[in-house]
Image (cartoon, rainbow, N blue to C red):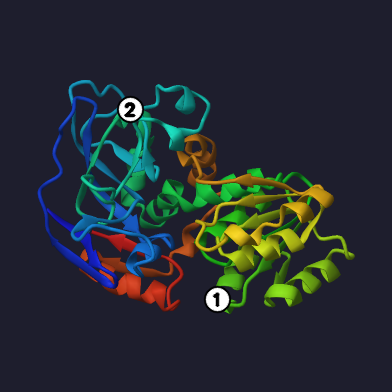
Amino acid sequence: MRATTIHAPFDLRVEDVPDAVIKDFTDVVVRVLRACVCGSDLWAYRGESARQPGQRIGHEFLGIVEEAGADVTGFAPGDLVVAPFVWSDGTCDYCAEGLHTSCPRGGFWGSVGSDGGQGEAVRVPFADGTLVKLPADAASDDHLLTALLALSDVLGTGHHAALGAGVRKGSTVAVVGDGAVGLCGVLAAKRLGADRIIALGRHTARTDIARAFGATDVVAERGDAAEAAVRELTGGQGAHAVIEAVGTEQSMRTAVAITRDGGSIGYVGVPHGSGTGVDLSVMFDRNIALRGGVAPVRAYIPELLPDVLDGTIDPSPVFDLTVGLDGVPGGYRAMDERTALKVLVKP
């Protein structure tokens, strides 16, 4: 089969690799119908997170079960399924608590020795604990398939950030970051009943999506100017709930600065240089809570799926460029150069 591999910074290749096959009785093989490029993939692309030459890449996909291991009970060939961005056994204490990302037997797609989502097929370990079945007729609905793909990562991650930030009905929310996760954070905040949503971003195409998703205000400034703008919009107090969806020192400093005393920050931006962005003394003095981390999206898919299926929420606008498998390297380049927000891959 063909799959995307990474060999060095900025050196992505789509090449022939061994076919995805059943190795354990709990495996299934999924033929990929839709995949995409994540902003976090760019850290490997830029050489800022280590990868072995030839390692697979991509962690968001949905597709059709082609083959199922003997111990798989929940899925059969022909089923349409979506995969969260980590696999998990579904039986451990962490999985039972909804923290599938801490499953001792879990792992990330594209890790050494595993298939990546940006390919023609994927071997899925612990299929019963990992995959979620989708309605069969969705396979023929291109728009719905695209919306459902967001369940594999960005929609659940935005939801995780909103929960961490304590978004509730009537609250004022600020979202730091105008990437796909930040935009899904806007969508999640609106879904949870936020009364006012302030989106921080300077790219008009992205902030237009934020407004369509429910943002009531847009702040294009950064740093001290962003803090001043948010405080002006909130009567000097700041936001009850702040979603941090970038992961840099500056973004975390901004998140702390615009949080109302007694408020909360939900952080889901993959950290890169953000360690010095948190001043605990400031957070202590102002009673600011910080909660977040890697999103256990497998726990959220059952809750979010019905709203995607009936159109209550539609995250599909975050995908603004579509490529075939051969176009994946160009898709990475487009996202790296910020000419694309999030690239959809149709193998």
Q: Quadrant of residue 173?
A: bottom right
Instruction: Assign a secondary structure to mark 1.
Output: helix
Q: Is residue 226 left or right of residue 303?
A: right
Residues 114 and 136: in front is: 114
Q: Which residue appears at 22% of the width and 60% of the height?
A: 4
Residues 126 and 269: in front is: 269
Q: Is residue 332 left or right of residue 170?
A: left
- Return the mark for residue 205: 1
Please give the residue where the numbered disc 2 appears in the rendered image: 128
- Return the mark for residue 47: none
Q: Is residue 229 left or right of residue 152?
A: right
Residue 130 in sight: yes
Q: Measured from the top left, where is residue 62 in percent x and y?
A: 33, 47
Instruction: Assign a secondary structure to mark 2.
Output: helix
Residue 312 in sight: no
Q: Check disc 1: other Cα within 10 Å, few if <14, some if 14-19, many if 20+.
A: few
Q: Is residue 86 left or right of residue 97?
A: left
Tally of marks: 2
Instruction: Tell me which label, 1 or 2, sits earlier in the chain.
Output: 2
Q: Which residue appears at 60% of the width and 49% of the height?
A: 161
Of all residues, the one furthest to the right in this rendering is 235
